[in-house]
Image (cartoon, grey):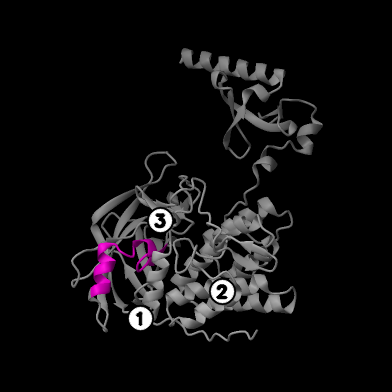
Amino acid sequence: MEVITIEYVPTTGETVTITAPIRDADSVKHTYEMFPNEIYYGDTVYLVCYDTNISDNTIPGFADIKDTNIISPCSVTISSDTLQSQYNWIGEYCSSVWDDRGLDTRNFIPGEKRLGCKYYLEFPPLEDWNVPFWKEMREKITPEGVRCKLSITLLYHRRPGESWTVEWVESATTVVTQEILVKPRLENEMTLLEQWYKNTPEKLFPKVDRSRKIPHDDYWGLISSGRSNIKIGWSSYDPWLFIRIGNRKPSDPNNPTTLDGWRELEASLVPSTMRDEVRLTRLQLEYYSATKGEASENAKKELADWLKSLPDPQRIVMTTFLVSKMYDFFQTSLRDKNRELIRALYDILDYGCQESVCNFESINYKDSTLTPPQGVRVQRSFMEIVEPTAEDLALNSKELPDGFRIWDAVGDVGPTRLVARFVELKEDEDTAILRNRDGLSFNLIFSTLSEEDKQYAREQHAKKLTENESE
């Protein structure tokens, strides 16, 4: 079969910079970069936020946002003078589990500029095809397009007291706006979008859960129906491995199931960000399908070079997505090729993504040679942290010089030894709370402990009760 030649044509439109008003008491300036400012109906707009410390003081414990649409430090609305309604975007999560892993805090020094939130804004998300605003736009759009106003209401960072909890405090008076031109899409592509919408069962669309969208049924994560798994070699894979969360143009159950199908789809679309998203998936499949050696290296280089060529907001969102899928790939036969790809992209990743890659490699690969970003302490696995060192064991003592203790337990996998401090005992709940050397508290089933350690935990618990009573 002859391979389709696909010429890449960059998306039209420009990257625009939006600077939020600076209030008298502000220590941080918020700047947004958006691409593109001119799209077709159905396209994606990419929005990233930068924070700059404009004060003369270090801001302790300032929040970093590592992952796309995980935590929203702004709310985004679109409206138009020619339309009756407006629309508010709701970020989509890949799981219904509340997770704070996208949030980290570190000191913010004077003059430092950091990448903050990363947004993908679908115009519209496929599940909202018939929401009044988008339906009205389809009915009223002219050949010249509809000029829309994107409004961003800032949510300011606040870290109360010494609590680790970071709150986002809305300031309804601080709104920045940007005009976007939405042009009519070709009729055959609009028909295709509508077919994808009508062909998607409700349970494959997300549902709204308070301030976010989550998988309709599955508690643990976004899982495909199996109707459109993608074939690579002798295996087939969940399409969400290769398709950015929130992007259903197309995804399960409408996406092509072969590399040739993705090639044909990309070649059929007008140059646009919708086509770019298809290209992102297609280039991944070219790489994962390529035979080892020159073909694989060429496919990897083509994907990396294309990503490098993209405007910053688009590249940042796309590379963040690729990093977010490392764990999922690690569970498949494609894990080694995925690792090679991420390593090839490492130099163009933002700070948070580089940190995520280094942490992932330090836990899952023992031969990682990547250099972490400055100031980042590479994370170790839980078992590496609690496992007694050779020096600990050489002391032949349960009690260690640094105040920690070697605990003995017997679980499903057999005897286990771990190093930790006592924190609390909840014997009625069969739980002992301990703390490891990295300062992380964790629960251990009390009944699995050795009799000696059970007695020690009871004594420490009684001692704490006595100390509390004396106070």
Residue linked to disc 2: 282
Which residue is label 3 attached to?
202
Can residue 367 be seen here? yes
Horizontal and vertical percent position of residue 161 = 38, 39
- Of marks 3 and 2, which one's residue comes earlier in the chain? 3
Residue 84 in the image, given as x and y percentages of width and height: 18, 66
Callout in the foreground (3, 2): 3
In the foreground, 407 or 250: 250
Sequence-wise, the earlier of marks 1 and 3 is 1
State yes or no: residue 308 in magenta: no
Estimate how packed mark 3 is, as few (under 14), some (14 to 19) or many (20 or more) residues with alpha carbons within 10 Å.
few
Say which residue label 1 marks: 187
Residue 397, picture quadrant: top right
Drawn side of residue 58 relative to residue 396, left or right: left
Crowding at dot 1, Cα within 10 Å, few <14 / some 14-19 / many 20+, comes out as few
**Residue 423 x/y as whole percent:** 57, 26
